[in-house]
Amino acid sequence: MKSTYPLIRIAVLAASALVATQGHAAEPIKIGVAVGLSGANSVVAPAVVQSSELAVEQINAAGGILGRPVQLEIVDDASGAIGAQKAFDTLVLEKKVNAIIAMESSAARNAALPVISRGRVPYIYTSFYEGRSCNKWMYVNGWVPEQQVAPVVDYFSQKLGAKNYFLVGSDYAFGRGMLKFTKAYIEQHGGKVIGEEYLPMDGSDWTAIISKIRSTQPDALISATAGGAPNVSLAKQLKAAALTLPYGNLAIDEGTGKTMGDVASGMYMSASYLTSIDTPENKKFLSDLGQKFGGNLSTPNELSEPQYEAFFLYKAAVEKANSIDSAAVVEALNDVSIVGPRGVVQMNASRHTPLAMRLGQIQSDGSIRILETQEGVSPGIQCPNLK
């Protein structure tokens, strides 16, 4: 994928120059974004970058934060642990950012957290993930299994009569964690897991696993892969194998689903954000993105929209604290809320947020049909020992 980084830097520098001419203090507030411009997450990275750019542009146009312009610092984390450690080192030690707002794989997040702790930098993690990652400096505005799994499993069991399930995942923290929770939830509600298989994060040959799915004849399939490329390869190979059982994907985002075309048709997904949400805030978000990026717009999705919100959550926390001091901002993040495209977002449930969850099914044209909506779904007890 061709990197958009040079264009991003030009846009950011232009925005910074603009706010400087509007009477802002010379020193900007630096917000770092570590994202997979290369590797598996390069499929979703463009939308994440665009949401970040839009948020910074809007904040600066409205006067910045505490009268200071926001400067975006984007670094490629290569979608993995080693790259994330390097990216966070760059942002914290070299760029000396005031905060980091980032959607990353779980492996990348886990590798980056020690850097966050040493640097004492507020970190808003914007990706859905397997849950229970806790750090003094981190807040999360994406969903966790307690919010995302139930809509899929309940629909399969109650509406489609599924009893026997096959689980497929990428062999790392997200895949293992999501499917551990999914298996427990299935069994607690009277179902049975008759197969569970994993491939490495960069694995792309699902042939042996698909053979096992065929031989065990489950009522439904649920996957939790590393997202991006593994989602695409698994779906294509399932399609080629002519397996037509109900398929719930716990790692698909709307943008990836659209790029997959007919391969994703019929797939079920559970999301806190879909472009079809009918609210004024979402309509404005989509309109603003369209005006800014035009024909270059990447489909907004479950990973890019929380990224957009997080900039405004950080802004609200800084303004409540009346300071960019890290400890003060982290304390304030627990108390602030915004109304965004998904609705009200407040990270006060053990540093996570209750969310409206929507069960959707991907249509042949790539659009998502919302089948059910559950309001205010709790993330459960995630980080009870952190204030």
Image: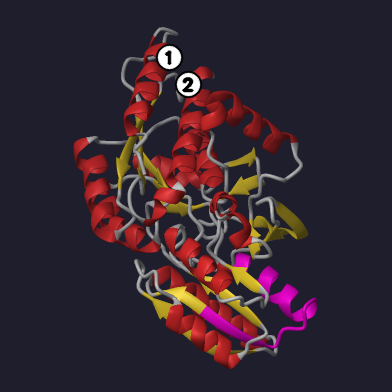
Which region shows up in magenta?
Answer: 146-167
Report the number of numbered marks: 2
SS under mark 1: helix
What residue is drawn where x is 35% and y is 22%?
10
What residue is drawn where x is 61% and y is 61%?
264
What residue is drawn where x is 69% and y is 86%?
189
Q: Position of residue 128 (x, y in %)?
A: 51, 58
Contact, CB < 8 Å: mark 2 with mark 1?
A: yes
Q: Position of residue 169 (x, y in %)?
A: 46, 74
Q: Position of residue 358 (x, y in %)?
A: 70, 58
Q: Which quarter of the rendered picture does the N terminus lie within? A: top left
Q: Is residue 97 above or below residue 16?
A: below
> Per the image, is 302 magenta?
no
User: Which residue carries the number 1 mark?
Assistant: 19
- Amino acid carrying mark 2 in the image: Asn
User: Which residue carries the number 2 mark?
Assistant: 60
Is residue 30 or residue 383 the one in the foreground? 30
Q: Is residue 25 above or below residue 296?
A: above
The answer to whether residue 321 of the structure is visible from this angle is no
How far is disc 2 from disc 1 in space, using C-alphas? 6 Å
- Amino acid carrying mark 1 in the image: Val
What residue is drawn where x is 42% and y is 19%?
15
> Is disc 2 surrounded by few (<14), some (14 to 19) or many (20+) residues within 10 Å?
many
> Per the image, is 164 magenta?
yes
Q: Position of residue 335 (x, y in %)?
A: 55, 45
